[in-house]
Amino acid sequence: MTVDDAIEARQVVQAWQRIQAWLQEHAPASCAALLPGAEAGQIRAVQDAVRVPIPKALTMLWRTVGGSVLRGVFLGNYDLIPLDRVADFYRDRMADHEDEEIGAAEERIPLWKPEWIPVFSNHRTSQAFVLYLDATGGLLYKWSRYGENNYGTDTEELDSLSSYLEEVADSLEYPAMATRDKPGLVDGVLVWQSGIEPGQKDQWEPVTG
């Protein structure tokens, strides 16, 4: 592991600790939906499914928190995909990549690449929209089942894992400075402004500090 890898891993853990502390105090229902940190065997199972080495920063995040079963903890109303679903999603997307022909053989569109590791999803069952970590470049990108902003072209999500988590923590602790999305609460559940559902409009209370 390089020095840069070690710094990124430390920053990821520190950012997550800030997020978790905020959830414990302000959004207990969201905090209760977090899964405990993954065991070594769970991470090995994902590594066996993924065809590239998993970056240290991501393994450190998984060791700290193993996923979320409630939508909306992260910016864009994403949740952290539980590890068993990470492996399943990766296998399914690689099967698409290998089996489905799109256009002429020489012009195949990459549905999924081996170095893309799914990390966050905005829907815990369908996983139609995913933030994946490009293991070769260390950046998060957006993937859509519908082909929108795929293949590392979405400039909005050009974050490292640590910078993304740090922005989540900053937005929660200093909501007046939040630019990408605004945090709020509905009955002890963290709900970002972009993900307010029609039935929540009257209940949603913006976080003010």
Image: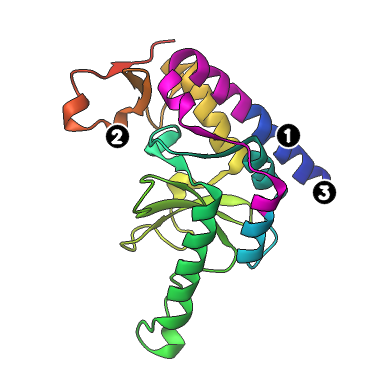
Query: Looking at the image, how many numbered discs can be counted on the residues?
Result: 3
Q: Amino acid at mark 1?
A: Arg
Q: Position of residue 175 (x, y in %)?
A: 43, 18
Note whether 191 is above or below 85 in the view shown: above
Q: Which residues are magenta?
A: 16-43
- Mark 2 touching mark 1, by CB under 8 A? no
Task: Provide the major secondary structure of the magenta segment.
Answer: helix
- In the image, which is nearer the foreground, mark 2 or mark 3? 2
Q: Residue at 53% across / 25% down in the picture? A: 169
Asked where in the image residue 20 lies, by quadrant, the reply is top right
Q: Position of residue 95 (x, y in %)?
A: 47, 75
**Label 2 residue SS:** helix
Q: Residue at 66% across / 60% down in the picture? A: 47
Q: Residues within 10 Å of mark 1 (few under 14, many from 20)?
A: some
Mark sitting on residue 61: none
The Cα–Cα distance between marks 2 and 1, rounded to whole angstroms, is 30 Å
Give the residue pinned by disc 1.
Answer: 10
**Label 1 residue SS:** helix
Q: Residues within 10 Å of mark 2 (few under 14, many from 20)?
A: some
Give the residue pinned by disc 2.
Answer: 195
Q: Amino acid at mark 3?
A: Thr
Residue 197 shows in this picture? yes
Q: Mark 2 or 1 closer to N-term?
A: 1
Give the residue pinned by disc 3.
Answer: 2
- Mark 2 touching mark 3, by CB under 8 A? no
Residue 22, magenta (yes or no)? yes
